[in-house]
Amino acid sequence: MSGLIPLFLLFLVAAVLKPHEIREDLTSRAATAVAAAGLSKNAISVAGRDVTLRGMAFSAEDQAKAVAIADAVDGVRLVTNGVELPGESKPYTFAASRDGDTIVLTGVVPDPESRAKIVAAATTIAPKVEDKMTYARGAAPGFADWANAALAPLASLGKGSASLSDGALSTAGVAKDMAAYNAAVGTLKKLPAGLLLARNGITVPAISPYVWSAAYDGKVVTLEGYVPSEAERADVVGAARAAMPGRDIVDHMQLGNGAAGGFVSWAKSGLAALGKLVAGKANLSDANLTLTGDAGNDAGYAGALAALKQLPAGLTLAKAEINAPVVSPYTWSANFDGKTVTLEGYVPSEEARAAIIAAAKASAPGATIVDHMQIARGAPRGFLETAKAALGGFGKLASGKIGMSDLQASLSGLLKGGESADGIVAQLKGLLPGGFALRADLKAPEQHPYVFTAKKSADGRVEIGGFAPSEAARAAAFAAAGAAGSGLSGKAAIATGLPASIDFAASTGLGLSALGKLKSGEM
């Protein structure tokens, strides 16, 4: 009897432990089985041979699969389905926002696997990720790829956002520069299948001042600065090719926000003017155009100036520094016919042009001034002073012409009555800057009848009148007249028209000698 008691106690222990062991075994096998359906082990409870499933499945298919798997476990008598499904989201939305080092994820996600992929992608963009997503059914196949595509542009933005609504992607943000903008927008050009870009709100700060330039060295046109879009880039490059055909075009322009509405037409105007030069540069700064460079000939210089006078609305010419062509010899002329002064040849600047026109008006009051002068470099030192001095001689001429070729000046024409060629020449030589030589050919007016008179009054004074053929002949006649009396007055103008048969010096000498022997008389 005493030996039966321990045996009975062992039986009681076995009877007590057997159900516990059975429950643990059943729980372990059932949990392992339903894990294939996505349920965690703590989502299962066992009472005897009855299994209750709890937790969350992420689709009706997974829910049914979990029940079927649990029911198929050997030893399970009854499966109670307590597995919940997340609610369905319509539309299916997701959003990601970045502010510096932090990305916040909101919206819905279909399952833990998709969540893990999205969080991992966000972590590669910013070190801090706040996951505020919730589970919901209704995601399209490939949702995780769509979400990662939405995150991609945020890698290039310091602050921005992206959102999904079903298969529509919207973005917003401000890129720090054009490189960041191009990188961000570049990620949106190839989206996963089924995802469409509904709105791209990524911008770049407006550039101010908005600058652009075209530099031309005679062989290559280099375009730099900013253009608003690729379409406008193509327009500008096309205008450069048209303005400077056959030249290489180097495009260093960048996309930039902040251009005024007339930007392309303004750039085309600068290129049109630049194309008239052999070398130069056109610059735009907002609505201000600057053109500098060298003209190769008169036509190019005039063409560039003409282009700058036809600027489109809104564009202002801030500065034009165009070097005129260099010419040699440097020629200039003024022709006066008594009514009109015609100015031709070259002048070094617009200021010189204005000064010469003013001098022409002063020398020939009432005359019409016709300006055919052109701007050119190469004028000798003292050019303007010489031209103005020579124009002063027109006041003493009935008609005439002034010519300049480098340092050689010439003056020809017909004297007004009573004017002295020698006097005009002497005066002009005194005004010329050093280095200039003067050649003069001034003719006296022709007179008919050609007379020379000398009247001696009772007091011995001699009064001269009429004409003399030259300065020397007049001086000799005046000397003889002075010797013929006690005083001298009157004048004799230089004139042509003396008959060839008359020897002026001999005739006046003879007559004045005879007059000197008279108390009074007339020759």
Image (cartoon, rainbow, N blue to C red):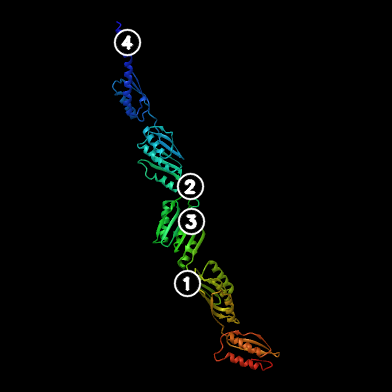
- Secondary structure under tag 3 reads strand
C-alpha span from label 2 to label 3: 19 Å
Q: In the image, residue 511 lies at what x, y percent?
A: 62, 92
- Asked whether disc 2 touches disc 3, contact meaning CB atoms under 8 Å apart, the reply is no
Q: In the image, residue 60 lies at what x, y percent?
A: 34, 29
Which residue is tagged 3?
284
Which residue is tagged 4?
9
What's the residue type where badge 1 is placed? Ser
Residue 328: assigned label: 1
Q: Is residue 446 depicted above or below 66 in this figure?
A: below
Name the foreground residue: 357 vs 102: 102
Q: Residues within 10 Å of mark 2 (few under 14, many from 20)?
A: some
Task: Choose the circle earlier in sequence order: 1 or 2.
Answer: 2
Name the foreground residue: 240 vs 296: 296
What's the residue type where badge 2 is placed? Pro
- Asked whether disc 4 touches disc 2, contact meaning CB atoms under 8 Å apart, the reply is no
What's the residue type where badge 3 is placed? Leu
Q: Nearer the viewer, mark 1 or mark 4?
A: 4
Q: In the image, residue 394 lies at what x, y percent?
A: 57, 76
Q: Is residue 455 left or right of residue 280?
A: right
What's the residue type where badge 4 is placed? Leu
Which residue is tagged 2?
205
Q: In the image, residue 243 lies at what x, y percent?
A: 42, 61
- Secondary structure under tag 2 reads loop
Q: Residue at x 61, y 93 (%)?
A: 510
Q: Nearer the viewer, mark 4 or mark 2?
A: 4
Tell which residue pokes out farthest to the top in this image: 1
